Amino acid sequence: MEALKVVTIPNYWTSPKYSLGQRIKQGIIVGIQYRLPNNLLAQSRDGSWQYTVQVSSNSKDKEVEDLQEHEVQPLPTQELHRLLTAEIEAYQRKITVLMQELAEI
């Protein structure tokens, strides 16, 4: 069992709008990094969050892309529901096949 990990964000940072594992239009958020104010890589003078997004669902080719917070496009509720339902059904089919294989042993 994996231990619970807690991340503390300093009070003077803004809170991120999105979270690890969240599905968005561009893919799935797999990393989050805070860019300090006046950093050459930051797009904002106030500091900003940058999200690393896995844009490819192909298990062999895990392409990632870095997005600034203003570039992230959340999924509409209906689209998220459709994606999650399809993923659950795929896993249920996989479980059924594995149970059949186990029964044959």
Image (tube, rainbow, N blue to C red):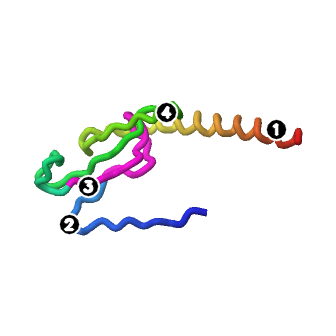
Type of residue at label 1?
Answer: Glu
Q: Which residue is mark 4?
A: 57
Q: Visible in this render: residue 76? A: no
Residue nearest the observer in this picture, 77 or 40: 40
Residue neighbourhood size for the residue with mark 4, other residues' Cα within 10 Å, grouped as few (<14), some (14–19), many (≥20): few
Type of residue at label 3?
Answer: Tyr
**Quick check: marks 3 and 1 in contact, CB under 8 Å?**
no
Q: Which residue is mark 3?
A: 34
> Which numbered disc flags the more N-terminal residue, 4 or 1?
4
The Cα atoms of the two marked residues, 3 and 4, are separated by 25 Å
Judged from the image, the secondary structure of the residue bearing numbered disc 2 is loop
Range of the magenta residues? 17-35
Number of the front mark, 2 or 4? 4
> Which numbered disc flags the more N-terminal residue, 2 or 1?
2
Q: Which residue is mark 2?
A: 12
> Which numbered disc flags the more N-terminal residue, 2 or 4?
2
Residue 73, given in percent of the width and then of the height, sits at 33, 37
